[in-house]
């Protein structure tokens, strides 16, 4: 017994010596920072809460088929403890559950990546430096602190890679390894479907990074079949048992809930920008790049404007990427790693060119191999030192930029500023009142989603909608949609408030509107439409909100649109 205790103590000491620093770095990073962008956390929370009340709000969504059910299951299991912490607010409780899941998945990602790196680099300081760069990368640091499934899928990808790559080259894979990796990979897809494109890279990793043999190939083929079987079984069970799919038409209808929305956020230029933004915070500078690309007539942007802002970050990121690639080419093992990176990057970036290339989470699947390549490049004696310095300059710049932008202090200041902007409005809201901003990029709309635990949002009366989803399938029908929602609010004894920005003949530069981003709508459309309506009181000053009164004229205008 004493010997076993000594062995356990020795293993714990060894683990702490190897992983203590990276765990501490993750704890400190997530203590002093927070997510600045919650993504679709609010939608997942609403689905879970609705399901607990016997309602269905895309609970079994095709693209994240297991994420909401897992959150709902854990919410029910931990309800007594969670309620003691946050009270009886169902939305806050669900947010805490999903955010905790993502945070734990982030910790798993850090430990898995560190373990993989040690397989290829024997210098602890380089491993720790690479892990620190990974922790403080924009996409990871943000989404590890949200209620989205992106980092959980990333952690499962890393676990699969760890299982397949953990053994020394002489030991080889076992069938157990193949099945375990298949389970991780299958769950990865079921949490977030777009990760399906990196399955070939995951399963090819043992072949590319070590000597291939017939036994290993057979195990990986078996793992591929197991991944397919797991995903098919899960989707079939959900489709038939939970969603009620009876024929291919039903299945297609269920699938298009996620994939059927059109988007203008595509193209090579936006993908080039999106990849860089995934690693380094650029604030709203993406709007300026859009204005430059579409030649915004209201707020034109020149090349000089871009140079003064975030263009240096983009240039530095691609120099960082180029320096890693060039150093990988200097050794045979590096070339193998480069081949794996290409196998990962081509489908990820290829899909992004045609679908939501500006979203920073789109490129999280690149992180495992890219940071593995960074660690290997820094560790390899054959690497050019000058190129390593270029990579380190980007790492230092990105980590400092991201840490500051997502610091708790900066985010609290931003939150207080927005709270004061809408403070007077919240005092006038009824339970059925609706507030309309122009688009999702309005800071008031973002406030309701990015600060879910703020007292104003927990009150439940602040229901903010956007007039238009730029690039959305029904963007051209925004008038009819507003008319329907406004009349519904009035019929439920609620008030309708709209941003005073719609009464301006042209958008200000800081309103996050890009003229020409969606060819189907122009800012002049908002001004023209709302100029014909009658308004009541206004709150919040020039950039506040005004009430659309339920007058006879307004009812007539809106009823004609909603027919």
Image (cartoon, rainbow, N blue to C red):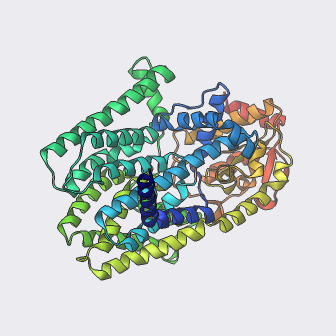
Rendered position, 466 above or below 405 = above
Q: Nearer the viewer, residue 4 or 452?
A: 4
User: x, y percentage for residue 50?
Assistant: 65, 31
Q: Quadrant of residue 240?
A: top left
Residue at screen point 25% across, 61% down: 337
User: x, y percentage for residue 178?
Assistant: 28, 41
User: x, y percentage for residue 394?
Assistant: 43, 74
Q: Residue furthest bottom?
A: 386
Rendered position, 544 above or below 331 = above
Rendered position, 82 above or below 343 = above
Does the rendering let one see residue 508?
Answer: yes
Q: Nearer the viewer, residue 341 or 533?
A: 341
| Quarter that holds the C terminus | top right
Residue at screen point 13% across, 48% down: 213
Left or right: 151 in relation to 377: right
User: x, y percentage for residue 167?
Assistant: 27, 54
Q: Residue furthest left?
A: 214
Q: How many marks?
A: 0
Q: Residue furthest front?
A: 2
Left or right: 267 in relation to 144: left
Q: Residue furthest top?
A: 246
Q: Nearer the viewer, residue 435 or 303?
A: 435
Does the rendering let one see residue 268?
Answer: no
Q: Quadrant of residue 259?
A: top left
Residue at screen point 31% across, 50% down: 347
Q: Nearer the viewer, residue 16 or 457?
A: 16
């Amino acid at each position: 017994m004493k010997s076993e205790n000594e062995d356990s103590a020795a293993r714990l000491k060894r683990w702490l010596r190897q992983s203590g620093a990276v765990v501490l770095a993750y704890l400190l990073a997530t203590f002093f920072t927070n997510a600045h962008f919650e993504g679709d956390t609010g939608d997942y929370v609403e689905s879970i809460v609705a399901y607990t009340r016997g309602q269905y709000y895309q609970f079994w969504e095709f693209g994240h088929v297991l994420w909401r059910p897992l959150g709902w299951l854990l919410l029910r299991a931990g309800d007594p403890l969670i309620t003691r912490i946050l009270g009886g607010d169902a939305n806050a409780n669900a947010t805490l559950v999903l955010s905790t899941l993502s945070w734990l998945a982030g910790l798993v990602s850090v430990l898995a990546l560190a373990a993989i790196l040690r397989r290829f680099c024997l210098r602890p300081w380089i491993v720790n430096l690479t892990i620190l760069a990974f922790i403080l990368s924009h996409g990871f640091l943000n989404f590890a602190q949200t209620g989205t499934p992106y980092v959980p899928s990333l952690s499962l990808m890393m676990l699969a890679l760890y299982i397949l790559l953990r053994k020394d080259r002489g030991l080889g894979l076992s069938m157990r390894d193949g099945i375990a990796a298949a389970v991780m990979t299958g769950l990865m897809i079921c949490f977030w479907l777009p990760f399906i494109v990196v399955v070939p890279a995951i399963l090819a990793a043992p072949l590319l990074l070590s000597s291939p043999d017939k036994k290993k190939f057979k195990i990986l083929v078996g793992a591929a079949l197991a991944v397919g079987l797991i995903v098919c079984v899960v989707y079939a069970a959900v489709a038939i048992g939970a969603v009620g799919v009876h024929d291919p038409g039903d299945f297609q209808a269920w699938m298009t809930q996620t994939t059927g929305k059109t988007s203008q956020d595509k193209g090579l230029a936006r993908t080039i920008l999106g990849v860089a933004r995934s690693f380094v915070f650029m604030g709203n500078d993406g709007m300026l790049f859009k204005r430059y690309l579409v030649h915004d007539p209201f707020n034109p942007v020149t090349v000089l404007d871009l140079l003064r802002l975030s263009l240096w970050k983009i240039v530095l990121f691609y120099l960082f990427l180029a320096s890693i690639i060039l150093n990988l080419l200097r050794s045979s093992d590096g070339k193998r790693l480069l081949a794996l990176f290409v196998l990962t990057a081509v489908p990820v970036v290829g899909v992004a060119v045609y679908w939501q290339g500006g979203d920073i989470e789109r490129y999280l699947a690149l992180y495992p191999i890219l940071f593995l390549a960074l660690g290997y490049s820094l560790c390899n004696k054959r690497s050019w030192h000058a190129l390593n310095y270029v990579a380190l300059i980007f790492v230092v710049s990105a980590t400092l930029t991201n840490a500051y932008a997502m610091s708790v202090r900066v985010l609290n200041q931003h939150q207080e500023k927005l709270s004061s902007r809408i403070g007077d409005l919240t005092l006038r809201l009824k339970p059925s009142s609706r507030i309309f901003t122009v688009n999702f990029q309005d800071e008031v709309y973002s406030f309701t989603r990015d600060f879910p635990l703020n007292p104003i949002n927990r009150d439940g009366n602040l229901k903010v909608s956007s007039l238009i989803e730029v690039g959305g399938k029904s963007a051209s029908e925004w008038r009819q949609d507003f008319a329907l929602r406004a009349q519904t609010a009035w019929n439920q004894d609620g008030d309708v408030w709209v941003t005073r920005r719609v009464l301006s003949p042209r958008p200000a530069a800081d309103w996050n509107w890009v003229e020409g981003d969606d060819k189907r709508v122009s800012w002049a459309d908002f001004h023209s439409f709302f100029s014909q309506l009658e308004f009541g009181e206004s709150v919040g000053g020039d950039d506040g909100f005004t009430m659309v009164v339920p007058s006879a004229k307004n009812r007539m205008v809106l009823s004609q649109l909603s027919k």
